Image (cartoon, rainbow, N blue to C red):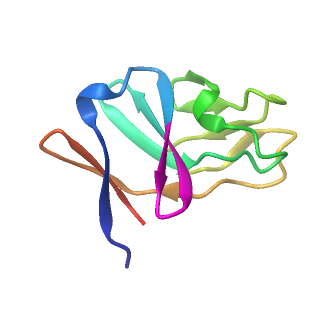
Amino acid sequence: MGRFVRVAAATTLVNNAGVCVEVEGKRIALFRSGDEIFAIDDACTHRGGPLSEGDLVGEVVTCPWHGATFDLRTGETQGGPAPSEVDRYAVRITGDDVEVEI
């Protein structure tokens, strides 16, 4: 079982947008979609594009480099050219702190 690490303040996350945080050498993309916050690997499995810079519609992010799409809830690819899913991370909110399990 992992441990939770503070990565951001919830009030700084913009709805329908991503931000990249680095936690112990891992680049993690955080997204706010309505009242939910999601965390996945920041690198697309196709060519490493920065998913935190992708377009977010609902709970699906599109890689800005080649258009692969990923479900933020599961990390699963929703459309090519990505060959595999990205890791997702459990998120919890403690006060205003966003914490990710690593």
Q: Position of residue 24 (x, y in %)?
A: 47, 64
Give the residue furthest to the right. Answer: 81
At a point 54% along the width and 41% down the height, the residue shown is 72
The reply, left or right, for residue 66 in relation to residue 54 is right
Give the residue furthest to the left. Answer: 95
At a point 46% along the width and 21% down the height, the residue shown is 16
Q: Quadrant of the N terminus?
A: bottom left
Q: Quadrant of the C terminus?
A: bottom left
Residue 100 drawn above or below residue 57: below
At a point 77% along the width and 51% down the height, the residue shown is 45
Q: Nearer the viewer, residue 38 or 20?
A: 20
Quadrant of residue 87 within the rendered picture: bottom right
At a point 57% along the width and 24% down the height, the residue shown is 56
Magenta stretch: includes residue 68:
no
Name the main secondary structure of what is drawn in magenta: strand
The reply, left or right, for residue 91 in relation to residue 11 is right
Residues shaded magenta: 20-29
The reply, left or right, for residue 90 in relation to residue 69 is left
Q: Position of residue 21 (x, y in %)?
A: 47, 45
